[in-house]
Amino acid sequence: MTAAADPLSGTELESLISASRLRLRMHTPFFAALAMFAEVRFSEAVALAATDGRTLLFHPQAYAALPVKQRDALFLHELLHAALLHPVRRGVRDQELFNIAADLVVNGMIAAEGSLQLPDGAIRDERLEHHSVEEIYELLQKRQKRKRPQLPLADLLAAPITTSETAGGSPTHRRQSGRSRSAHTRQDESADQHKQGRDSAVEQQPEMDPADRQELEAHWKQAIQQAQVLLRSQGKGDLPAALQRHLDEIVDPQLDWRSQLWRYLVHTPNDYAGFDRRFIHQGLYLDHLEGESVEVFCCIDTSGSVGEKELSLFLGELKGILSAYPMLRCCLWYADAKCYGPYELIQESELPAPEGGGGTDFRPFFKQVQKTWSREKQAVCVYLTDGFGNFPRQEPELPTLWVVVPGGLENDEFPWGEAVRIHQ
């Protein structure tokens, strides 16, 4: 990329941003409305662009040198990273791999819009980009390293940064608490700049505190909701389904799959006295279960779609539930095109070795449940699977929870029951 010959003034740089906002308004009014909630600053502390989750930072010369469509795409790229909370959702995951997953999500959204041009080298994977960033991360982990997309520029810094001043623009508002930022900058180059003191505009800060993160999440939740209202008020129709799913992760986030599994398995029509205090320290506010026994019919898809990692996580949580609630009676099956079991599980049970390896058919399990259920107790079915298989024509009598592995069938494509994604 060739930098502009002469540095642009602050007014000229602000005009570039204003022009990008106006073009977004013409082509994608939803994104233009979303951009109203982001502060924009210019700084030479980043090689190309960065965001702390609210403020978007751009390198003045590098940004100005981009063709117009690529400049707009870069603006939207950073805006989506911020709005989808990618800087703070990484947690303890591998930095580079999560960076790749996050870029696949936002680049797919930009490409779907159609009027913008992704910069050269931008990574895409149409098979993955409709999944959540966490789910893409899990799927990439399973790939051999040589088959993963190559990250042209680092997009998420390992530590949050704050800006004390900007180049070619207004001074940046400095926040006292640290925030995670994503940045289009090579990590090695950024680290060298810090070590040699070539630019004081970027300083490493501690991890974001919970209150600051909560405030940031509320900020973008409100932004997405207001942008959706504006879109409908202008008669522009609904957003594409794939885009809506990504936004719903922020506006209406799903419970952690473990919490959902625990809540689901201990649920009966009774009213309980309160929460079980044994699990509050884990952030699990589970109803205290007394008296009535519950039957749990659990099946694990062994057609090859469930990996050892998911199997281990699932069975570990299931055994934890059994140890906490001895009144639960659990029968386990393995299934591909056939059903193997049942194996009755108690707290001290050794888990039977998985059986199967053929195609996927959900019907044998539900037939087995019909034969096994005593009909004297409340009961639920829990199925760990990718969701690709033959379903019964009629919805089973018992409620069903589908625990879906990364890359599995979309939640709304299950014909009945409730689906929850499994990822760490």
Image (cartoon, rainbow, N blue to C red):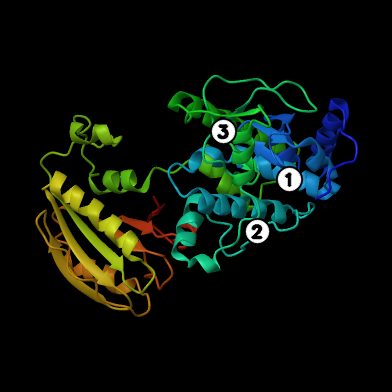
Q: Please report the residue visible at 67 percent of the width from the left and 46 percent of the height from the top.
A: 238
The answer to whether residue 359 shows anywhere in this view is yes
Badge 1 marks a residue whose secondary structure is: helix
Depth check, front residue: 271 or 296: 296
Q: Earlier in the sequence, mark 3 or mark 1?
A: 1
Residue denoted by label 1: 74
Q: Please report the residue visible at 43 percent of the width from the left and 69 percent of the height from the top.
A: 388
For label 2, the crowd category at 10 Å Cα-Cα, with few meaning under 14, some 14 to 19 and many 20 or more, is some
Q: Residue 245: which numbered mark, if any? A: none
Find the residue positioned furthest to the right: 6
Q: Is residue 363 depicted above or below 39 in this figure?
A: below
Q: Is residue 228 depicted above or below 106 in this figure?
A: above
Q: Residue 221: which numbered mark, if any? A: 3
Q: Is residue 348 depicted above or below 212 in this figure?
A: below
For label 3, the crowd category at 10 Å Cα-Cα, with few meaning under 14, some 14 to 19 and many 20 or more, is many
Amino acid type at mark 2 = Ile
Q: Earlier in the sequence, mark 2 or mark 1?
A: 1
Badge 2 marks a residue whose secondary structure is: loop
Q: Residue 123: which numbered mark, if any? A: 2
Are discs 3 and 2 less than 8 Å apart at CB? no
Amino acid type at mark 3 = Lys
Q: Position of residue 14 (x, y in %)?
A: 83, 29
**Residues under labels 3 and 2: Cα distance?**
27 Å
In screen coordinates, is 250 left or right of 108? left
Q: Position of residue 294 (x, y in %)?
A: 17, 50
Badge 3 marks a residue whose secondary structure is: helix
Q: Earlier in the sequence, mark 3 or mark 2?
A: 2
Q: Please report the residue visible at 73 percent of the width from the left and 36 percent of the height from the top.
A: 58
